[in-house]
Image: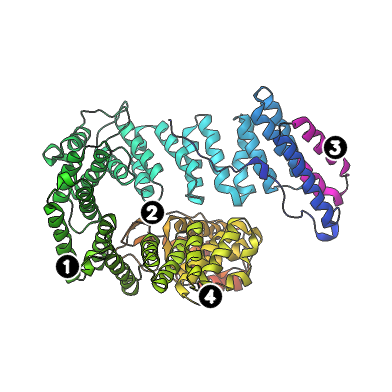
Amino acid sequence: MTRRRTLRTGRVATLFFGVSLLPSCELWAVQSNRELVLQSVNNALVTAERGNFEAARASLERSLAQCGAGAQSRECRVLYASGLGAMLQRRAAVESESRDTLYRQAIGYYDRILQEVPNESEALYGKALAYRGLGPQEWMERFFVQAPTLDPARSALYLTFKGDYYATARRWTEAADAYRAAIQRDPDDDGARSGLIDALEALGVSSKPELLRLAKDWELRYSSSSADAYRTVLTLSFAAGGTRDSVADAAMVGLVRLQARDRLAVGAFPEPVSATWTPVREIRGFLTTASTQTAPWWRESAERTNALAQAALAGGRAASGTPNYELAEKLWREGVGFAPRLTAVSLDLQRQLALLYSTQKRLDPDGKKFDALEQDIFSEKMGALAVGDLEAAQRYHTTLGLIYLERGVWRGQQAARGAEQQFTWALDKADERNQRQGFYQPLPEIRMLLAHHFDSVGSRSLAARRYGEAARAFLDLDALEDADTAMRRAAALGSQTTDAMRALGLRSALARGDAGACGEQSLSSLSGGDRTFALRQRFKLLADCAKVDATRARIHAIQAFALVDSAHVVLVGGADVARFERVMASLLGAFGMTFRPEHLDPFASPNAVQALRVSLPGETVPFAYTAQPDDVLGARISAALRDVRPFPMEVAAGVVSIVLPARPSPEVLARIQQVVGVKAVKYGAAAASQ
């Protein structure tokens, strides 16, 4: 198990308390004194950063003793104890000879805080970090089991810690259960994903089907974790008792597909995998000969053939970097010959060939190869237009635009044979698809290319328009710095991008941790102009506010959910999917329900109530996130009870079961019954209403 574990544990230095722990009438001193304490703690930690730990500790301990013992000085004691815990953990990280003693002393200060303020989240977090630094001990198990319920906001992180504790103790079944629970609460937790792969590998060959399922689920959003899972399936397939079965075959195809897509070394497999195994022998042979005659296994199904085409694309890129341009040409021409027509990989192969012929004239001295390739692409594009295939037409326009861009031809003798016209048509087709199909694509890179072009030739109004579009598109993809750059260029040309400026200002403030961006007045400023853009940005802000603004987290989550469930806001990028999953986990968790994350699939015709449309960067087809119907219903119920104190319930097949001893009022039961999709409301097995 050599995967690098990346746990999002934050920095010890941030373990401070930013809110008052007492009502205002009981504060130990006026606000100015509280700020002085915080400054004192920070000064001591700066001293510790310089390596003078003794001076920092003496200062903090002296100040802690001066706080006093009364209830009115509780916050003073808590702040200084927190600073001492953080300082001791820093010291433990650099003084290995006294590490254990220092971690135990830090734990003592966190326990002191918890005696003053039970279940204080920052003290729990600090204690968890100190426990992890100290190393697993049997007496820690109770804490790691309880922590997720004591600090629900960090439950996923604590579950990962819990999994790490069990993994260190080699209690693999319990570790896997903890990691699964962490992923359910926060699919973005890369530490939990990595830990689950390790645990399943340790559990042996019986875990292969689950690992394959995880690899497929993660492929679009977490490609590194997906590749690790595929590799683990292959490793287990060649371990003692392993078999080269259909699961191993599927893992091989998936890994090659990922290697090709992410520009990794295609054909690099885990050491236990035999070089004589048919899929390995054939893919390596194909990459050196460029002949499909050497790879019959890879032509046995459409999925394998598509992966082989992607391997041809990646293999040609690798060969051209050697450089071995003859092999690159052979791989790409062979790929064009068998790749499915009208697909992205087919066009990528053609584009690479066109670029090769543009830069390596000796391969095409008279230009005939390029001319024939260009004509083929134009013919295929016209065929796509003739049958009304907007998606294929968009891809052909984009491909031709990139080819002409790489050849430095913005405006050809014929308009169609220049990057300007092809990129413009590509955006037109994307806009038409949005109008007809409801599939929005940001495409900021193309918009920026056109903006720079128009700017360079003095077409100020066209440049300003494209810069403004790019700014909104970058915001949709969470690229705030790029959005700011595009916005500044638009403003320099006299374009008004008020809606984008407001969105960028709020999102930048929120990225800095400023919960003031979550106020209703701030959020209401996202109106006017492009309504759908405003709604997309409002969803991002509300979902992030549900994570940052603890005092109104549930309200923010409810409002974010409504934008997806009722307003049908398109999720843009994997970050939006993660936002939606956090919102769902928050709404369901409040009533004791567990959210079950799903995966992305190409959008076909899923149930309109359950499926969410997702736009992914680099993909010209929409994807669908199909949430569990009962999870969606549970979230709707949670939203309907926004002013009700949560109580445990369960939802199964549309039937809501109130978990005893909870006894909500008849008015609350009636509100639940009115939620669309609820079939019945029951107390346990006895029906409360039908």
Q: Residue at image x 20%, y 32%? A: 281
Structural crowding at the residue carrying mark 3, measured as other residues with C-alpha within 10 Å and reported as few (<14), some (14–19) or many (≥20): few
Give the Cα separation between the discs numbered 3 and 4: 53 Å
Please report the bounds of the magenta region as a residue range.
52-81
At 77% from the left and 46% from the top, the residue drawn is 79
Quadrant occupied by the N terminus: top left
Query: Sequence-wise, which precedes: disc 4 or disc 2?
Result: 4
Q: Secondary structure at mark 4?
A: loop
Q: Say what amino acid the circle numbered 2 marks.
A: His
Q: Which of the labelled discs sits on residue 382, or is there none?
A: 1
Front: mark 4 or 2: 4
* Residue indicated by mark 4: 527
- The picture quadrant where one finds residue 257 is top left
Q: Position of residue 489 (x, y in %)?
A: 48, 65
**Marks 3 and 1: which is nearer the front?**
1
Contact (Cβ within 8 Å) of mark 3 with mark 4: no
Q: Position of residue 240 (x, y in %)?
A: 32, 25
Task: Answer with left or right where residue 663 lies relative to residue 606.
Answer: right
| Residue 103 numbered mark, or none | none
Looking at the image, is mark 1 or mark 4 nearer the viewer?
1
